Amino acid sequence: MRFMVMAMVTKESEGGPLPSPEAFAAMQKYNEDAAKAGILLAAEGLSASSQAIRVKFNRDERIVIDGPYAEAKEVVAGFMIIQVKSKEEAIEWVKRAPNGSATGEGMVEIRKLMDIEDFSDMLGAGFTPNEEVAKVKY
């Protein structure tokens, strides 16, 4: 099972001071441990929402909205993709992560990435995926 772990923006991560060198080192160590365990597929930080662009879909119209955004608590600051055996294992790995926040406050969201089998389960026995797409393993 693959999960996306999203670190949500805080006031300090949206333009405040960078985390301390110790906090960076702790996160590097955590990522190295996850990579050595064979569960880390990707991990990246994202630029501040002041540099972001959203595209809103309204039927055939596309509306471009420049950041920053008022609801910063709903903005992703960084992510990692992990592959583990269960949701519980994903939670345990996230609970091990260092807290790099100077204030000690933060929020992480964990969401399962959908595989072709998930769509087959949801859409029923009559669902037959495109064979070429179904062969792709991420």
Image: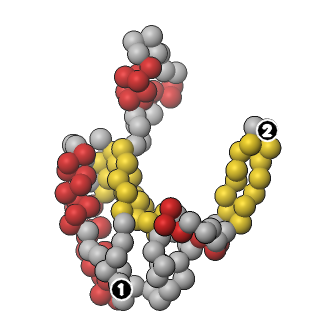
Please tell me which residue is depicted at 40% across the width and 43% down the height of the picture.
113
**Residue tagged 1:** 102
User: For numbered disc 1, what is the local secondary structure?
Assistant: loop
Residue furthest front in the image? 70
Q: For residue 69, what is the image quadrant?
A: bottom right
Coloring applied to the structure: secondary structure
Q: For residue 61, what is the image quadrant?
A: top right
Q: Is residue 99 visible?
A: yes
Q: Is residue 77 visible?
A: no
In-front residue for pair 69/33: 69
Q: Is residue 61 left or right of residue 41?
A: right
Please tell me which residue is depicted at 75% across the width and 57% down the height of the picture.
64
Q: Tell me the number on the disc at residue 113.
A: none
Residue furthest top in the image? 126
**Above or below — where is 129 with respect to 16?**
above
Counting residues from the start of the chain, the first of labels 1 and 2 encountered is 2
Say how many tags the image has.
Answer: 2
In-front residue for pair 27/76: 76
Q: Position of residue 97 (x, y in %)?
A: 26, 68
> Please, what is the three-letter code of the amino acid marked with disc 1?
Ala
> Please, what is the three-letter code of the amino acid marked with disc 2?
Asp
- Mark 1 is surrounded, within 10 Å at the Cα level, by few (under 14), some (14 to 19) or many (20 or more) other residues, namely some
Q: Tell me the number on the disc at residue 60.
A: 2
User: For numbered disc 2, what is the local secondary structure?
Assistant: loop
Q: Is residue 2 left or right of residue 74?
A: left
Q: Position of residue 88 (x, y in %)?
A: 20, 48
Q: Position of residue 18 (x, y in %)?
A: 45, 86
Quarter of the picture holding the N terminus = top left
